[in-house]
Amino acid sequence: MKRSLFLSIAILISGNVFAATDHYVLRDGNYVRHLKVTSINGEFIVYADVDYESPAQESGSSHCSVDIAGEAKSTGKNELVMKKHSESEASFCELKIQLGLNGAKMEESKDCDNFAVGKCHFSSNGKELIKIK
């Protein structure tokens, strides 16, 4: 009896939760950008990271790897905005995401410099991150 009751409750709960995750990647020269957008019942969670490795022949070679994650709000059809508060300053990094059928573009606010230092930046500079299927 307990088993069938538990199974019935599990089926009811699982039917009410709709979750989907999309991954996007862009390799652009020495940059690799990754974006993960998870949608759970109309709410969005965004994770973005960027890795930069300067070429060996470049003097003062540098490397950086930065990520940011948080809840995002839908601001229009296929548009998301994530705001993340900087722990060190009284500012917010705002990441604007334009989703397409096969990819996504990212733009960052000036205050994202508190999260991404050096040559690392989240903006895709108008280039599209390709959706991984």
Image (cartoon, grey):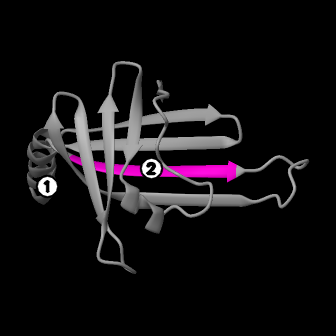
Residue closest to the eye, 130 or 133: 130
**Residue found farthest to the right:** 57
- Asked if 28 appears above or below 107 in the picture, the reply is above
x, y percent for residue 100: 33, 22
**Few, some or many C-alpha atoms within 10 Å of disc 2 (few <14, some 14-19, many ≥20)?**
many
User: Can you say whether 71 is above or below 8 in the image?
Assistant: below
Q: Which comes before the other along the chain, label 2 or label 1?
A: 1
Numbered mark located on residue 97 in the image: none
Percent of width and height locating residue 103: 42, 25
Looking at the rendering, which quadrant does residue 93 occupy? Answer: bottom left
Image coords of residue 104 (percent x, y)? 39, 30
Tell me, yes or no, whether the highlighted magenta stretch contains residue 130.
Answer: no
Identified at 19% across, 39% down, the residue is 18
115 over 29 or under it: above or below:
below
Q: Which residues are magenta?
A: 44-52
Residue denoted by label 2: 48
- Distance from disc 2 to disc 1, alpha carbons, whole Å, reads 38 Å
Q: Which residue is mark 1?
A: 6
Residue situated in front as seen by the camera: 105 or 69? 105
Residue lying at 45% horizontally and 68% vertically, measured from the top left: 114
Tell me the quadrant of the picture where the N terminus can be found: bottom left
